[in-house]
Structures are given as structure tokens and as C-alpha cells.
Image: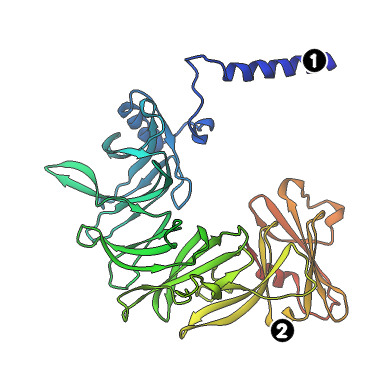
Amino acid sequence: MPKFKGIKIIAILCLVAFLFCGCNSFRLSSSIDDLISPISPSGDNAGVQSAVDEYCKSGYSIKIPATGNYTTSFILKDIDGDKINEAVAFYEPSNKVGTISMAVIKKSGERWNVIANVDGTATDVNSVDFCDFNNDGKLEIIVCWSVVSKQTGTSINVYSQNENDSKYSLKSVSKAITGSNFICVDANDDGVMELLVFATGTSSENPRAELYSFGTGKRELIGETRLDSTITSFESIKYAKTDEGTSIYADALCADGSSMVTEFIYWSDYYNSIISPFYSYSTGRTKETLRSSQVTCRDIDDDGYIEIPEDTSSKKQSSEITSQNWVNYGNTVLSHKCYSFSCKRDGYILVIDDDDFSKVKANYDSESRKLTIINKKNKSNVFEIVTLINSNYSVNDPKYKDYTMIMKNSGFVYLAKVNKSSDIDINIQTLKDMIKVY
């Protein structure tokens, strides 16, 4: 057996040596996309790939947007309003390693063909989205590119579709916009969508949000606001209706790497611009929505409105558990809605009734991944939640015979056991309603 093990080690070393030798016929992949062996496409995807194969005769590798709503090899979407899906693909040509291009592919009869191409100067594609900015029935394509020049950063381009004399083309509406994230939203409620761009800032500039209109076919900056000076990246951006009309909620990580802030943004007719009402121009901070946990804002209580999590003190609590006071915006102020305990490691949030929140404390055992909620008054367990990897769980395991599954998510199962004599009225069905994905 030892001799066989030694042979395997030698074989591995030989393989590594081959990979890093000067063999001209072998090229290390330029990105992680090349290291993943794709499944052979079928249906429309197969036709799209054949079209790209024919267009890129020198070879290519498909690039997948890193984030956003569209993270597939080929994005199928009706972008020209003809009720038939076109395809959008990002790729790295083999003869232009390190630059990413974008192709639009259309089906004619049973055959797919590349009908437009944007030669790239970017090194990667962060995200892509589609929006009709001028109500002409055709979608503009918005791409956030990773760019490496004098400085590494990201830029956003908006591409419009053009068809003259039956010839289709893509055109960049304007020069690239410096920014790391964006959302398409009718921020000023005028019936026309705008592009809200977020930038993390530089050593000389604060992070900021800029609102652009493309209604005339040209780019126009119609509003801007500064954001918390410590923001380093944006984690979640969403919008919803509030008393102020359409409001945007941007959750961002701060420079310490552990805290998060929500930038609440809306259009002000008075200032004729977007504003961030909780940002202080004197301090450069947005302290009112700053928190130590990385829980993002959401409709936590299913009332149709987005709530923002704030820190709330909870004494004698395990360090792995954080507690939140959820607030929502109305009549120019943030008002309390509910409380919660959160466990980032295990990926869940527990919404706690206001009357019960002050009566309990949370203990967490990291080895068993068990959360125990305890009645402060009589020291009894109210309930327990155990997190297990799905493959490690069996309904017939005697260890968990007293537990009931209350949620299943991303390869994990969450089991709960309730103590009916804890003097706090919580049952299994209540827990199923209380638990949310982190």
C-alpha cells in the first residue's frame, strides 16, 4: 500500500510539472470560467453556441456575469419587442485574451446568427440588465464592466439598439459612467425609467449615487447625492413605494469590513434631485441606518413594505447571534416594526414578537450549531434550532426524533424543538412563520 501511495504522489507531481512547463500547445485559463467544463447545451442554447462558434472562428471562451439577475452563459430575452427571444452572450476571443466582448444573436427560421457585436476593452463583466429608457418598446442593454487601465475599477455602459435599412447595430449611448452598481428605476415617478448608478468613491471623492435619464436618446444627469464616506461595496439594492413615492434602499459594507449601512434615497421635487435624507454633510456619515450586523433590508414582516434593520442591545447574548430592531420609513421618520435574532453563520433570521423579545435571550453552541432561546425569568428553554447539512440529516436518526424540520435552504435543513412549558407561547407552526433566510 505505501508503494502504491508513492506512485500516486509521483504521478500528481508529474502532472503539475506538465501544467507549468513551457509547452506552447498548453495555455492556462485566463479566468475561472475556463476552468469549468460546461454541460453541452441543448435547444436554443445549442443554436446560440453554434452561431458564436461560427462568428469566432479563432476560438473563444464564454464569460458569465458575476452578479445580478442574469448569470447564465447565454441570456435569452426579447430585447427588440418582436415577442421572440434574442440571445446576449459575453465572450473572450482567443486572439484577444484579457478582453471581453458582447454579442447579440437572433434566430431566423431555425438558424441563429450573430447580428451585432461590441468589441470589448474590459477584462470581465460584473453584471448586465435590460431596460426601456425611452418607451420605444426596445430594451437598452446596461453592462457593468471590470476595467484595468491606469487604475482597476468598474464602468457602466448603456447600449441602444438601432436598425437602419434593415441593418441592426448596437450603439453606446454615451461615454462609460464610473460606477460599481446600478438599478433601473422610475425614481421621479414620471412614467419613464432612469438609471441610478452607485460609485464607491476614491481618495478624493465620497461615495455617491447619480441618476441618469436616457429619455431623449442621450445621457442626462438629473440628480445626485453623496453617500456614507466609509462605504466600500454595495451588497443589495432594491426599491419600493413609500410616502415619498418610489424609494431606493442600498445596503453597503463599510470600511471596517463588518458593519453595514442602508442608504435610503428618493426623488425630491423641492430640490429637483435625488436625496439621501439620513446622510450628514457635516460628518460625511449616514449614522441613523448604520449597524454592526450584515443583515440587509427587506420586507421582514410581509406587510408589503421594506424595513431597515438597526442594532438593538441584547445583554448576555452569544457573540454569534445579533439582534435587530426593524424600522420602516414614513412621514419623514423611521418607525419600529418588529425585532429579530440573526445567525449569519447558519443563514437565518428569527422574527420575534415584541412582547417576547424582552423576555428572552439567545445562546448559541458553535460545535453543534444549535441556537437556544431561553426564558430570562424562569431560565427554561423556549425552543432550540439545529442547523444540519442536508446530506447529514435523516428523518430516522434517533438523535433528532424530538425535532421537526421548519425550513430547508441552500443545502441546509433547520430542525426545531419547542418546550411547551416555558411560559412563552411559541409552537412549531409559529417557528415556521418566524424563520427567514438571512
Circle nearer the N terminus (1, 2): 1
Question: What's the residue at 63%, 78% (across, down)?
Answer: 338
Which quarter of the picture shows residue 372?
Answer: bottom right
Which quarter of the picture shows residue 204?
Answer: bottom left
Please tell me which residue lies in front, 359 or 80.
359
Q: Residue furthest front?
A: 204
Instruction: State yes or no: discs 1 and 2 in contact (Cβ < 8 Å).
Output: no
**Three-letter code, disc 2:** Asp
Query: At which x and y percent is residue 312?
Result: 67, 75
Residue placed under numbered mark 2 in the picture = 355
Q: Which mark is residue 4?
A: 1
Q: Which mark is residue 186?
A: none
Helix, strand or loop at label 2? It is: helix
Query: At which x and y percent is residue 356?
Result: 74, 80
Question: What's the residue at 63%, 51% (across, down)?
Answer: 410
Note whether residue 234 is visible. Answer: no
Please tell me which residue lies in front, 357 or 151.
151
**Three-letter code, disc 1:** Phe
Please tell me which residue lies in front, 131 or 319.
319
Question: What's the residue at 21%, 42% (across, down)?
Answer: 169
Helix, strand or loop at label 1? It is: helix
Query: At which x and y percent is residue 183?
Result: 40, 60
Q: Residue furthest left?
A: 165
Query: At which x and y percent is residue 125?
Result: 42, 44
Question: What's the residue at 70%, 57% (across, down)?
Answer: 346
